[in-house]
Image: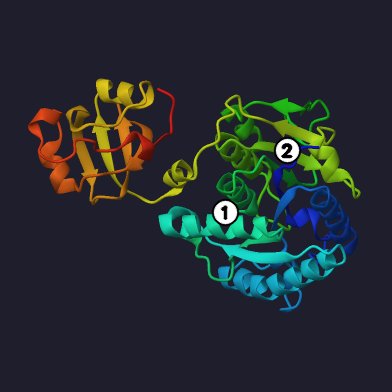
Amino acid sequence: MERKRIVVKIGSSSLTNQKGEIDFEKFNDHIEALAQLKLAGHEVLLVSSGAVAAGFRRLGYPSRPVTMKGKQAAAAVGQSLLIQLYNEAFLNYNIVSAQVLLTRTDFSEKERYQNAYATFSELLERSVLPIINENDTISVAELTFGDNDMLSALVAGLVHADKLIILTDVNGLYTMNPMTNPDAQRFDFLTSIPDELLSITAGSSSKLGTGGMESKLLAARYAIEAGCHVFIGKGTGAEKLLQILANNGDGTYIAGEKSTTLSNRRQWLRLSTVTGKIFIDGGAVKALTSDGKSLLPAGIYALEGHFKQGDVVEVFYQHHCVGRGEINYGKEELMQAMGKHSTELKQPSEVIHRNNWVQMKEV
């Protein structure tokens, strides 16, 4: 089998029992499967939930805490317990693992995004298995991923993974909720995540975790847009991940129609903080989205926000955001230049170079 780079996401429901404690039968099953995947020669990254679920009992909570301080305290206790269990279990297979805690800022700030990529590259080059989780202890609501499903998709995009495997307690995606409707039919293979499917799963969640099927679909949508194939489903036994990789898994496979991998720069642009808006005309939108050209001042007719050179701005056409890019002008300079042709300008004419642009919407 061809060597692949694989991100595996294990949710709380797949790792703990109904009381919120670590289920060692489930845990050891995952360890064996991950070890078999690694020993088969693949590069493996693990995004593991379970820190809050593993820690709240130690704090004396009768059930999963609902307050932010309670969740963060439980994560502080549970994260160390969880990583210790992983480290000891993987050493039985002579696999070295490493803990990596991330926040949303690690993906939205350029330097931190580049540093995260460099760290993962070094770990994988040295055959280390990274164990990744959100840094729940210090994260604030505005900077969280929402759940580890999206974190796993962002990591898969960052490291240019070949496949993202999201393990859950449901064997794939269905036309309707299979728990309440016996007529529900499973999707064995999808090439996209349509909005209609998202509406079916809206509001679903797990008792012991933050994610539901809706969050998995949103994560899958991001991953396939970044060029990564996705599997959502379940499995048991030491061979389950190898079976999934061989297209024999119990779940839904999702592969985008476009096989192009989104570069790290363009992934960062999709995730970065936006400081302004630029409004363009039809000629400019054609140049950007169809002709593969850069954005010039002549096609700009309005500005919003406060931005400086090097910031990321959104680009609008007829009130629809068509993309975003890293801008070469500050707002004051662009106000003087917009609407003008290159021959009328003294400074470089490209407002957003095509290499610093990412399209967000088909036009």
Determine whether the residue tagged by mark 1 lies in a helix, strand or loop.
loop
Percent x, y of residue 357: 37, 37
Q: Earlier in the sequence, mark 2 or mark 1?
A: 1
The image quarter containing residue 187 is top right
Residue 348 percent location from the top left of the image: 18, 39
Q: How many marks?
A: 2
Amino acid at circle 1: Gly
Residue that label 1 marks: 146
Given the image, on which type of amino acid does mark 2 rest?
Phe
Quick one: 206 or 259, which is closer to the camera?
Answer: 259
Residue 294 appears in which quarter of the rendering?
Answer: top left
Helix or strand or loop: what does disc 2 sit on? Answer: strand
Residue 62 shows in the view: no
Q: Residue at x 53, y 66 (%)?
A: 139
Q: Position of residue 116 (x, y in %)?
A: 53, 58
Q: Nearer the viewer, mark 2 or mark 1?
A: 2
**Residue 64 position (above or below residue 231):** below
Q: Is residue 191 left or right of residue 116?
A: right
What whole-number distance in Å separates the C-alpha atoms at marks 2 and 1? 20 Å
Horizontal side of 72 relative to 104 (left or right) equals right
Quadrant containing the C terminus is top left
Give the colour scheme shown.
rainbow
- Residue 324 or 262: which is nearer the viewer? 262
Residue matched to label 2: 231
Examine the rendered structure and indicate whether residue 267 appears above or below residue 22.
Answer: above
Q: Are marks 2 and 1 in contact (CB under 8 Å)?
A: no
